[in-house]
Image (cartoon, grey):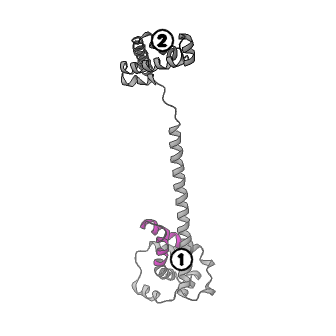
């Protein structure tokens, strides 16, 4: 088992050893860890660097569980890349901490980018589902529905014709020619041999009368 694996799985470390390592410069611990000369070097290194690594990640990512996972990812990546660490340039403990924190920043940003792409895919999928639902054709009406609609239309036509039949002849003729036969005002005037203005007056009176005869929902006929 490697030193990093033992650190993540271990539940306790000898207190005397921990206190001794804490007094060791990080530069020395880092060199021992890289060279593999001292398995306990990483234990002490982890304990002293981890709080800074965690702060770097927690400033960018929310959720304690997620932060804990990313801290481990950061240390695993650092372990894989440990041979690229340049000990000749190390002069202070801060340089070692900065190296780990740089890896932590990359881990956090990589997580944020992946989460953003995941949310975008979810939104796109939801949008496509919504659009597909909106474009679905209406279900085919049943025989019963068609029968009811046909009976309603027949009933409306009958009510309208009965109401038209109650109009005075001069108004009824205008409505029948204009609405039932589709003649224009000029054509209706020529057929009845009256002026166009007279046609409009008779139509206006006829539609007002029909509005009184028919139920409120049928008033659209007079429009």
Residue closest to the eye, 103 or 153: 153
Q: Position of residue 87 (x, y in %)?
A: 61, 85
Residue 139 visible in the displayed image: yes
Q: CA distance from mark 1 to mark 2?
A: 92 Å
Say which element carries label 1.
Answer: helix
Which residues, given as a range, are shown in magenta? 51-74
Residue at image point 50% right, 81% down: 45
**In the image: residue 90, left or right of residue 55:** right
Q: How many marks?
A: 2
Q: Position of residue 168 (x, y in %)?
A: 41, 11
**In the image: residue 128, left or right of residue 51:** right
Name the front one of labels 1 and 2.
2
Q: Which residue is mark 1?
A: 101
Q: Residues within 10 Å of mark 1 (few under 14, many from 20)?
A: many
Say which element carries label 2.
Answer: helix
- The secondary structure that dominates the magenta segment is helix
Residue closest to the eye, 170 or 101: 170
Residue 70 falls within the magenta-colored stretch: yes
Residue 37 visible in the displayed image: no
Q: Which residue is mark 2?
A: 173
Residue at image point 59% right, 77% down: 82
Check the image and report above or below for 198 versus 57: above
Residue at image point 57% right, 17% down: 186
Q: Position of residue 101 (x, y in %)?
A: 53, 76
């Amino acid at each position: 088992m490697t030193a990093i694996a033992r650190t993540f799985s271990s539940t306790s470390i000898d207190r005397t050893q921990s206190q001794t390592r804490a007094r060791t410069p990080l530069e020395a611990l880092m060199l021992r860890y890289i060279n593999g000369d001292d398995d306990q070097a990483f234990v002490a290194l982890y304990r002293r660097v981890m709080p800074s690594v965690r702060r770097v990640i927690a400033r960018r990512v929310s959720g304690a569980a997620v932060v804990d996972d990313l801290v481990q990812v950061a240390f695993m990546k650092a372990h894989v890349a440990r041979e690229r660490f340049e000990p000749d340039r190390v002069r202070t403990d801060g340089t070692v901490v900065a190296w780990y924190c740089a890896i932590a920043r990359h881990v956090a940003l990589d997580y944020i980018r992946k989460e953003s792409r995941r949310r975008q895919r979810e939104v796109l999928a939801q949008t496509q589902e919504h659009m597909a639902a909106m474009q679905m054709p209406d279900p085919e009406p049943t025989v019963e529905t068609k029968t009811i609609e046909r009976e309603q239309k027949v009933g409306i036509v009958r009510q309208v014709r009965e109401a038209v039949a109650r109009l005075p002849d001069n108004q009824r003729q205008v409505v029948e020619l204009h609405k039932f036969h589709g003649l224009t005002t000029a054509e209706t005037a020529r057929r009845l041999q009256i002026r166009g203005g007279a046609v409009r007056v008779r139509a206006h009176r006829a539609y007002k009368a029909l509005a009184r005869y028919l139920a409120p929902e049928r008033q659209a006929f007079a429009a």
